[in-house]
Amino acid sequence: MTSTFTRVLSGAAAALALFGAAQAASPPACAIPQTLTLAPAEIPPDDQIHTDVPIAAYLLALFWSPEACRSGIHESDKTIQCDTNSFGFTVHGLWPNGPDKVHPRYCKPSAPIAEKTVRANLCMSPSPWLLQHEWQAHGTCHWPTPEAYFKKARAVRATLDVPELAPGPGDVMTAGQVREAFLTRNRRLTREGLNVRVNKDNRLTEVWVCLDLKFKPAACRGGNGTPDPVTIRVAPRR
């Protein structure tokens, strides 16, 4: 009995050791700098404060990171997002939407997000400024704390098998091919529930995944963006 028990313990210890070694050898989800420059609290423009708009739906906005880096938009963090890491789709934000064209926004004042919270979410949304902005502009309209807001954003993101995009010669795809990349990996999604966004140069910027009040996939209330047949430019992932 004792020798059998000892062998079981030894085997379990060896398995745990191997598991620990494998975990230690696994690369992190992304590289986060030791020193972070945190964003200050925003002072929202008066015309963007909408505290009394009811929530009718949600959407998860996914930004195509290679385009963010190529264009150098304000939302991106050059060091974290573009120099240190190589991302595909990142989470722009989880947004409560209103019943019409005006959406809940900047629902209550907020202090700067704690550094621990910023660090915990940089591999999802790799910009301290963007995390602060998304919490204040959108998260304050439904969630009690930044931690609760980002926890829900991570949970919604985890329900999706987000694809990589491989543009063809000339770095082009059709909007329909972008949708198909999502639909192939996510049987619960529908074509009507994906809004493909491009900028004025017809370059892919985002894909919005539309959700109902229970955070389940739903048809987009405000349209679907770029039609399937349209050829768009897609910055390749480096």
Image (spheres, helix red, strand yellow):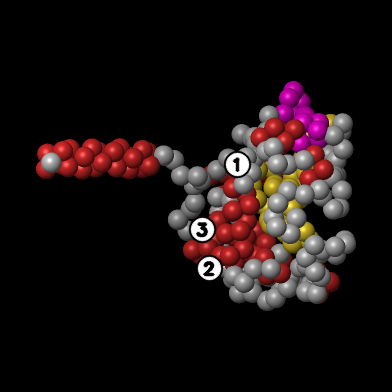
Write down the quadrant of residue 235 in the picture: top right
As measured in the structure, the alpha-carbon distance from the residue carrying label 3 to the one carrying label 1 is 16 Å
Q: Earlier in the sequence, mark 3 or mark 1?
A: 1
Q: Which contiguous range is marked in magenta?
A: 167-179
Q: Secondary structure at mark 3?
A: helix
**Horizontal placement of 119 versus 46: left or right?**
left
Specify whether residue 3 is in view.
yes
Determine the residue located farthest toward the front in the rendered image.
Answer: 1
Q: Judge the density around disc 1: few (<14), some (14-19), many (≥20) Cα neighbours within 10 Å.
A: many
**Marked residue nearer the N-terminal end (1 or 2):** 1
Residue situated furthest top in the rendering: 169
* Amino acid type, mark 3: Arg
Q: Which residue is mark 3?
A: 119
Q: Is 147 rendered above or below residue 221?
A: below
Q: What kind of residue is marked 2? A: Ala
In x, y percent, where is residue 68? 69, 46
Tell me the number on the disc at residue 114. Answer: 2
**Residue topped by disc 1:** 87
Q: Quadrant of residue 131?
A: bottom right
Q: CA distance from mark 2 to mark 3?
A: 9 Å
Residue 124: percent from left, percent from top: 58, 51
In percent of width and height, residue 62 lies at 69, 47
Residue in the picture at 78% in, 65% down: 55
**Label 1 vs label 2: CA separation?**
24 Å
Nearer to us in this view, 235 or 208: 208
Q: Residue furthest left?
A: 2
x and y percentages locating residue 134 in the rendered image: 67, 62
Q: Let me know if residue 178 is in the magenta part.
A: yes
Quadrant (top left/top right/bottom left/bottom right) for the N terminus: top left
SS at circle 2: loop
